[in-house]
Image: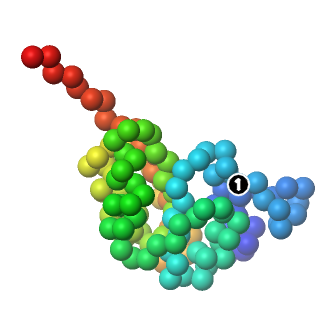
Amino acid sequence: MKRRQLLQILGLTPIAGSMSHCVLASELQPGLFFYDQRFDQAISAVSAIRDAIAVDADVTTVWQQAIRPELGSKSLSVRGLTTESFHFCLKTLISDHARVQSASLERVSHDLYLWSIATQPYARMEINA
């Protein structure tokens, strides 16, 4: 995969044709970005993304520490460059606890997928006794 194509997939836009300086779409849309640290392609692709979070095959720590505490109180934007199984497990957990507003999944290599999930908290029902 060419570097320019990968930058476009990740949402990076070259400034004035220079590949060394990029504007991140994620700076316009705050959220969490995860990448699978087992793959060199993922590591090099996200080097320009500030605060990208390295993960491995296990979604448990990410779920418990970074995502679950935030779901009930606010909308959340989560993106990643990981395996399909990581995305599937995380999306399943998220959909049990919040409304999935939008989701996308795109294969970028044999093992890696670029994905995004945007959530909205469930509306709380008040019961008047």
Q: Residue furthest top?
A: 128
Please tell me which residue is depicted at 48% across the width and 53% down the height of the picture. Answer: 78
Considering only vertical position in the picture, is 35 above or below 29? below
In percent of width and height, residue 15 lies at 85, 55
- Residue 51, given in percent of the width and then of the height, sits at 60, 62
Using the image, determine if residue 70 lies above or below residue 19: above
- Is any atom of residue 106 visible in this view? no
Figure disc tally: 1
Q: Secondary structure at mark 1?
A: strand
Q: Quadrant of the C terminus?
A: top left
Residue 31 spot, x, y in % from top left: 54, 50
Choose top left, top right, bottom left or bottom right for residue 52. Answer: bottom right
- Quadrant (top left, top right, bottom left, bottom right) of the N terminus: bottom right
Q: Position of residue 105 (x, y in %)?
A: 48, 59
Q: Residue at x 26, y 49 (%)?
A: 96
User: Image check: 47 left or right of 92?
Assistant: right
Residue for point 63% across, 52% down = 26
Which sits in the foreground, 30 or 106? 30
Mark 1 Cα shell of 10 Å, populated few (<14), some (14-19), many (≥20): some
- Residue 98 visible somewhere in the drawing: yes
Looking at the picture, which amino acid does disc 1 mark? Answer: Leu
Corner quadrant of residue 72? top left
Q: Nearer the viewer, residue 57 or 7?
A: 57
Which one is in front, 72 or 95? 72
Q: Residue furthest left?
A: 129
Query: Compared to 27, does 86 lie above or below?
Result: below
Left or right of 10? Residue 62 is left
Name the residue carrying label 1.
24
